[in-house]
Amino acid sequence: MAEGLTGTRRRGIAIMIVVAVVALLAAACGQGAGAAPAEDRPQVTIEHTFGASTFPANPQRVVTFSAPWTDALVALDVPITAEFITRNYSGDNGAFPWTPQHESEKVVGADNTDIDYEKLAALQPELILAGYQTQEAYDRLSAIAPTIPVMDSTAVLDSWQDVTAAAGKIFGKQAEADALIADVTTKIDKFKADFPAVQGKTFSYGQFTGDQFGLVAADTDPAARVLGELGLTLDPKSKKEGKGSARVLVSLEKVEVLDADLVIMWPLTGGEEVLEEAVGWSDLAAVRRGSYVIVDDTTASALASPSIYSVPWALDHQLRPAAAELG
């Protein structure tokens, strides 16, 4: 009887050891390879438009609200816990055509102000990569976890270079981030070498809503900054119409304001067919010449929200065909 009791105890102890080992392995996998507890990791500080955020390096549970941040993390092979995306403006099935497949939970909202804060808190993020500039949203997000809004206080969105470099700093992958930036810079340089006639040419960029155009009117616009890297300049007519504003609405009667060496247009209402029927559109020199680009709700983000992946995609799929018509 005593022997049987000893055997039972031994079996019980063995089972407890196995359970303990499995639990330890599961915890290790949850932290990620080589991940140290938060209190043992060095602190990282990222300065931004609302001050600065300090948090343990290499955070394990990361939530993104911005496609450029998502792309930077994917490019650096950093796991993403969840992505808060905008309905109808985040690509097919919540993924843009230039972003490689990756695992993450998608949380869909009507726009970037439609945030499910309860859902966000339940995800228990260690870091929130917001990437846009709203004090109210920043205050609520940062109450849940350290948050990075726009880092450059003079910009609407941070440049793809700054986002990629910051991601490298946060996750201890600065060399990899520098290499990614250098690679895309090389592609930009090749575009400029392939199309020398583009240098110094003007562009206009806008949205068509059926009865008016919304034009980019400042060099600080994200799309304007990328196009500027290619050697293009925002058309003076757009700037003049804006009178210092970043964007300006132009009526159909003033469609000639759009005309530039290169015209990029995003039809928000009715698609390209309705745009082609708009009074004066087909008479623009850029349209007659073929040096224009039509983007849609998905592809517009390639330039409007530029990233380490979207910029090369835009060069190949949007800008090369139009640049060829400029000489």
Image: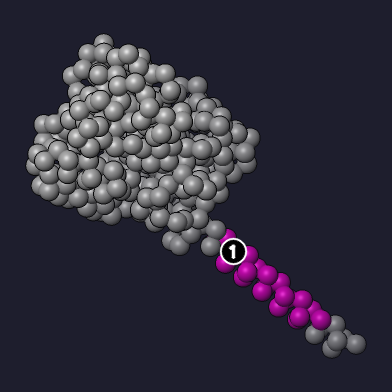
Q: Does the magenta stretch include residue 9?
A: yes
Residue furthest to the top: 243
Tell me what residue is drawn at x 48 percent, y 59 percent: 32
34 left or right of 202 in image:
right
Q: What is the magenta range?
A: 8-28
- Quadrant for the N terminus in the image: bottom right
Q: Does the magenta stretch include residue 123?
A: no
Vertical arrangement, residue 209 with respect to residue 191, above or below:
above
Tell me what residue is drawn at x 55 percent, y 46 percent: 106
Q: Which of 99 and 322 is in front in this view?
A: 322
Numbered disc total: 1
The colour scheme applied to this rendered structure is one colour
The percent position of residue 174, horizontal first and vertical second, equals 28, 50
Q: What amino acid type is highlighted by mark number 1?
A: Ala
Tell me if I can see residue 38 in this picture: no
Vertical arrangement, residue 306 with respect to residue 281, above or below:
below
Tell me if I can see residue 74 in this picture: yes
The percent position of residue 20, horizontal first and vertical second, equals 65, 68
Tell me what residue is drawn at x 22 percent, y 52 percent: 183
Question: Toward which corner of the image does residue 229 lie, by quadrant?
Answer: top left
Vertical arrangement, residue 256 with respect to residue 54, above or below:
above
Label 1 residue SS = helix
- Quadrant for the C terminus in the image: top left
The percent position of residue 29, horizontal first and vertical second, equals 53, 62
Q: Nearer the viewer, residue 140 or 307?
A: 307
The percent position of residue 54, horizontal first and vertical second, equals 41, 36
Q: Which of 281 and 223 is in front in this view?
A: 281
Classify 10 Å Cα crowding around label 1: few (below 14), some (14-19), many (20 and above). few
Q: Name the residue under label 1.
A: 26
Tell me what residue is drawn at x 43 percent, y 23 percent: 210
Vertical arrangement, residue 302 with respect to residue 287, above or below:
below
